[in-house]
Image (cartoon, grey):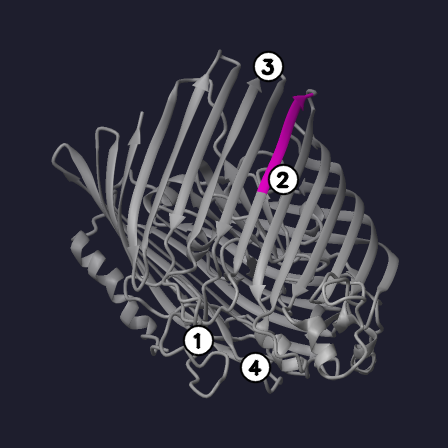
Amino acid sequence: MKKPESCLYRLQILLLATVFAGPSFAQGDTVLEEIVVTANKRGAVSLQDTAGSITAITADTLERTLAEGFEDYIKMVPGLTSVSSGPGQSQIVIRGVNAVRIIHNAPQTRSLAGLYIDEMPISVAGYNPDLGVVDIERIEVLRGPQGTLYGASSMAGTIRVVTAKPDTEEFSGNFGANVSHTEDGDINHRVKGSVNVPFSDRVAMRLNAYHTSKGGFIDNVAPGMEEEDYNSEEIFGGRAQIAYYGDKLNAVAAVMYNDLESDGPPDEYLPNPDDPVIGAVSKEFETVKLVRDFYNQDFFAFNFNLDYDLGPVLFTSATSYFDMEVVKSLDDTYRVLAVTPIRAPWSDYQAWDTSESVIQEIRLSSNNDSRLEWLIGGYYEANDREFLQTQPTPGLNAFFVSIGRPPPCPTLTGPCFGAVADSVFDGTATIDSEQFAAFGEATYHFTDALRLKLGFRYFDYENDVYLLGSGVANGGVSIDEDLLKEDDWVPKVEVSFDVSEDHMVYATYSEGYRLGGINGFVPEVCRAEVEALGSTLSGPFHSDSLENYEIGAKTSWLDNRLTANLAVYYNEFDDIQTNVPLNCGFFQELNAGKIENTGFEGDFTFLASEALTLQFGFAYVDSEVASSIPGVNADGDEPPYIPEFTASGSVDYSMPLGNGFGFIRADVRHVGSSGNEFSSQPTISILPSYTIVDLTLGYEMNNWSLSVFARNLFDDDVITNIDPDRIQPDQLSRGLPRTIGVGVTKKF
């Protein structure tokens, strides 16, 4: 591994850009553009007037940085990180709220952070759909538990991707394309386009589409399977919206589609010439895959939002449906060779995961000027999920014959212990869940400056699980069916006070929660290990929860040319859900004690002149186990995948040039080191800190824009995940190496 450069060295590019910009003389009428957010579900409100720690990324920023997906925009948000195992396989971490890496065969594990497209929740733990950043109005990142308004799986925070809506004013659109090359890799290209079509002064339609091709940068060096840049990927998708805007009724219907096909994850094994399996690896960006890995994710969604003005009350309805299918293949040869005496040439783990949800939310909210503002609503979600897995391993049946044991299978090509021929393990999980919730928030203005907000959410949840396991590793056929029911409520209390027109302080107590589930696919041979952890085979793991205490300030200075927002928080993450790798080759999910997080974060924007904007943000968190479970963690442990310090900054400068104007933008992102397990585990591996710099140079004229860009300009090593499987050597997931390209955009 290359030694990471210092953060200060990386910041040099920002200093150079500032020098390039020349003197920064403030203009008397120059102020920062107001950013509005809709996070409170009561209409658009200025970001600076909204209590709570929120970062908003505007459409202009997304376009200027040529953002394509999730990994591009999280760079701009301190305290927001992801554990990524490859395209479409991200786990969102906000404010250090995490207890485990979500693994590929844990369909009942749920997200700790919510992901929304407009009003539609689309979070799928570990498999969050990464829809293309095309025709987006803004992205809002809400830190801290959002349990009252956003419910389950928003206990660490919520990301809201707000799409641009149809416009009845004029016909418009845009087209963009870029091409780039990745260091030690292949060519990448992307095309995108959108069009807005008004039909009348009340009806309009908006369409967009995109296609991305990435060439890969990992070489497979397995003998007989050699392939350069094998981790290529293709993404195709789009969105169609039609809107009606009436005197009292507004309605928007949208369909969206995203198809991801990846030939392999960005995995890397470290060189070890003495290892019989990975001995072929000799340098960075190399792996050994004895079977062809792939990951395909197909996402379709429909959303219908309606607002009706009833005078003093506004009625809102949000109806959503989404269907996601994942097909995945992983080379699992190393694990099979490590835990069994079978000398198979390869073992291929295959999984099919389908998730279908119907979601309905209705709200009533106050719609007049009054000291009391309120919102009350109901929520219903039905989710059907089916997870299938199999492990074909050539020669499995013949192996038993070769060692002189009675063949456990009727024939050498027939079913074996209930599994398909030559499969170590087959598993089926059918998970039907249903959730009802009632929620509300009310804000009372005691004076023009002092406000009190009270909120609540009550939820009632039912999880019906059917599990079927079979195969040699399972010891035969096992069937289990369980029903988990839970209900509870979460409160919120918030006080905010305007010290002056430009300075607000607030204090918040809030809670969040994540739903529980049922353990499965753990055979009898693992019983002793499971019971030593204080758990049971096929036993439930219950909801975990988070209590958050926070104080903060939203401030504007220098005649609204500088904003400085700060927050300090303490939270208790209790009954944490985690999965524990077992020596028998399976894993167990259980509630494993309590984690305490103490953090401090800041976000600053300075408009130095009409031409020059500077931004900087940071997040610090001290996270440790306060109550432990023997065999899982220890008091004082640092939880996995939580960097202590993250920071991001940017310099954006524009200047007249010829008949148009040019711009330069530099973005820097620093992420501290973290472990892939609780820090007391002897098998822990460390994800090193990294600092990346992105640079964009552009020129705009007559609705045309030409950009030259570099991502990870200094080619720093970025490790986004280390597989914590204790049976095999570390398998690193690599972030994007240095990538340089050119892009063009036309607006009409």
The C terminus is located in which quarter? Answer: top left
Q: Do callouts 2 and 1 mark residues in contact (Cβ within 8 Å)?
A: no
C-alpha separation, residue under disc 3 versus residue under disc 1: 56 Å
Say which residue label 3 marks: 247
**Along the viewing direction, whichever of 66 and 596 lies nearer the viewer:** 66
Q: Is residue 347 above or below residue 553?
A: below
C-alpha separation, residue under disc 4 versus residue under disc 3: 61 Å
Question: Dot 3 lies on which element?
Answer: loop
Disc 3 or disc 1, which is closer to the eye? 1
Q: Amino acid at mark 2?
A: Met
Instruction: In the rendered structure, find residue 250 and report the number of the disc placed on it.
Output: none
Say which residue label 1 marks: 688
Q: Is residue 363 left or right of residue 698?
A: right
Please check the rendered image and state whether residue 506 is part of the magenta-colored stretch, yes or no.
no
Q: Residue at x 57, y 18 (%)?
A: 244
In magenta, the rendered stretch is 299-309
Disc 4 or disc 3, which is closer to the eye? 4
Say which residue label 4 marks: 684
Q: Earlier in the sequence, mark 4 or mark 2?
A: 2
